[in-house]
Image (cartoon, rainbow, N blue to C red):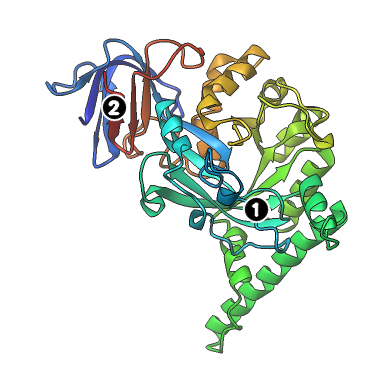
Amino acid sequence: MNCIKNAKIITMDKDRRIIDRGYIKWQNGIITEIAEGECGDVNAYDAMGQTLYPGFIDAHTHLGLTTNGVGEESEDFNEESEPCTPHMHIIDGINPFDISFSEALKAGITSAVVSPGSANAVAGDIALVSTHGRRIDKMLLRTVGVKFAMGENPKMIYSGKEQTPYTRQAIAAIIREALNKAKRYMQDKQKALEEDEDEPEYDIKNEALIPLLQKKVKAHFHCHRADDIFTAIRIANEFDLDYVLIHCTDGHLIADELKEEGAYAVCGPLLCDRCKPELANLTPENPALLDKAGVCVSICTDHSETPIQYLPLTAAVAVKNGLPHDRAIEAITINPAKAVGADDIIGSLEAGKNADMVLFEGDPLDIYQSPKLVVAGGEAFGES
């Protein structure tokens, strides 16, 4: 199959087009055509008037880093040996045979951002992956960021080991030290190239941070409390980094400030309790209040905190608490694509983008609804 016809198509492109009765074609996993009318392909899948959306995107997960049903042996999301580990490659820890991948795909989630945990002030790189596949190298869509963690988690982990950081000041200092070293290392490499001199001795940690300093990837800051959010922004501005605020639990308290900064907020998990002091201000109204202020909002499950297949349910909770329905769909399609810098390949249905899409008979945020068809990278699943 490489064509769907007779579909109501929610494009999520910049014009937010809705095609009442149209078709979409793809080849080699890439969308080639999307238009109103008949496609003329007798082998096309007949959507019979059902609604086609871009494949859903979970903007922040630990998918495949802790395999369901295995326990501690499979936990590979936190390297707790030292607080600064930017050189860790996340794909070396992802297990694509974890059942959570297939559960995500069945729910219409065609791609997910997989991040290290928040034990370390500087934790390693972040991958955007397809939820379909067996080999993570082929599932990798691109590396999108470097993980940083503010606040309680690094403090709790390392103070228990009687080593830094004990305080928020120390967390920020560790991050600044790493970025300053990488900046000088990058400048020394450039100077050596220009003046035909020997390059500085290879440093794997500094090398790992160069793409961030060059704005090829973004800084993903784990931050709940308002003061931690502002520290993340302060550091990002100091080093001229593109950044994303992960969790952003207190965002609703400072929404006007985040709008002024042009920040991207990834909210979630929403289906959880207030299990630690930083979550005291947790509210399911957070996405709605941030959106109302003009902040670009994405919704995440933080899998496995909330199982990834409940991403649409999480978006529904946000709608119940004030987020407009169309904005909730944006928060699990085009907004996360923009937030992580991948809206050139995913997040909307447009020619030239990945053939990731999901077909629903009813409201995709209705708990009783399941996709009738999921297409990931041009491959169809659940065909009925």
Whole-percent x and y of residue 354? Answer: 35, 39
Amino acid type, callout 1: Asn
* Left or right of 174, for residue 203: left
The crowd level at tag 1 (other Cα within 10 Å; few <14, some 14-19, many 20+) is some
In front of the other: 220 or 68: 68
Answer whether labels 2 and 1 touch (C-beta < 8 Å): no
In the picture shown, does residue 128 fall above or below 349? below
- Give the number of the disc on residue 33: none
Foreground mark, 2 or 1? 1
In the picture shown, does residue 57 fall above or below 167? above
Whole-percent x and y of residue 28? Answer: 24, 42
Quadrant position of the C terminus in the picture: top left
Taking the image as drawn, is residue 263 in sight? Answer: no
* Residue depicted at 74% across the width and 32% down the height: 249
* Residue depicted at 35% across the width and 43% down the height: 133
- Give the number of the disc on residue 34: 2
Quadrant position of the N terminus in the picture: top left
Residue assigned mark 1: 78
Quadrant assignment, res 167: bottom right
In front of the other: 324 or 319: 319
Quadrant assignment, res 247: top right
Taking the image as drawn, is residue 307 in sight? Answer: yes
Whole-percent x and y of residue 383? Answer: 27, 22
The crowd level at tag 2 (other Cα within 10 Å; few <14, some 14-19, many 20+) is many
Counting every numbered tag in the picture gives 2
Amino acid type, callout 2: Ile
* Left or right of 373, for residue 73: right
